[in-house]
Amino acid sequence: MILGFNHSGFVVQDIDLMVAFYRDTLGLTVMNEIDSVAPPEGDHTGIPGAHRTLVFVGKPEGDHALELVHFIGPPSPDGHLHRHQLGAAHICFDVTDLEALHKELSSKGVRFVTEPIMTDTPEGLRRGICYAQDPEGNYVEFIQPPTASSS
């Protein structure tokens, strides 16, 4: 029955800050922006009368987007789940050169939880992984799938 993925979402406090991070820092494109108001009896969110700004970011050639959800009313409570708590989430991006990306994003002030961990496969390919956080503390994973080693 499932055809594939459509989008993932993060609830965010500062929609402008978060759009700037995903658009300007990570290079994604704003695909759609919606002002959403639920009817008084509620809608699919289960929050009657919820007023939200929804901004979808992604790659135009991609088939998956990240939805940034900002609740105008009722406002989201303060706080954030630690990465090992139930309900915590992250988004993962495939990248072509993890070490170069890490250097570039570090120079832009992106907070990394881990340095790139690079390993070589028995086939002579190089792969890597690391985690960062966006400005509101959501976890962002970067994976370099196995590629030809430059060494």
Image (cartoon, helix red, strand yellow):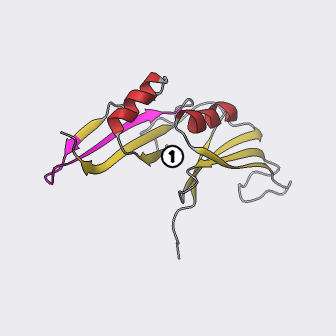
Q: Which quarter of the figure is the C terminus placed in?
A: top left
Indicate the position of residue 12 as horizontal and vertical percent values: 64, 37
Magenta part, dominant SS: strand
Q: Residue furthest bottom?
A: 1
Residue 74 can be seen in this image: no
Question: Circle 1: is it few (<14), some (14-19), or many (20+) Cα within 10 Å?
Answer: few
Q: Residue at x 57, y 38 (%)?
A: 22
Q: Residue at x 75, y 51 (%)?
A: 47
Task: Inspect the magenta stretch and tell me whether residue 133 lies in it.
Answer: yes
Q: Residue furthest left?
A: 122
Check disc 1 and give the amino acid type. Gly
Q: Residue at x 64, y 30 (%)?
A: 17
Figure label count? 1
Q: Which image quadrant for residue 13?
A: top right
Mark 1 secondary-structure assignment: loop
Q: Residue at x 59, y 38 (%)?
A: 23
Task: Inspect the magenta stretch and tell me whether residue 19 lies in it.
Answer: no
Left or right position of 121 against 68: left
Q: Is residue 31 above or below residue 2?
A: above
Choose between 24 and 44: the one closer to the eye.
Answer: 24
Choose between 122 and 10: the one closer to the eye.
Answer: 122
Left or right position of 77 against 151: right
Choose between 45 and 108: the one closer to the eye.
Answer: 108
Choose between 49 and 115: the one closer to the eye.
Answer: 115
Q: Residue furthest right?
A: 40
Indicate the position of residue 70 as horizontal and vertical percent values: 70, 40
Q: Which residues are magenta?
A: 119-134
Residue 118 can be seen in this image: yes
Q: Which image quadrant for residue 83?
A: top left
Report which residue position mark 1 lands on.
Answer: 87
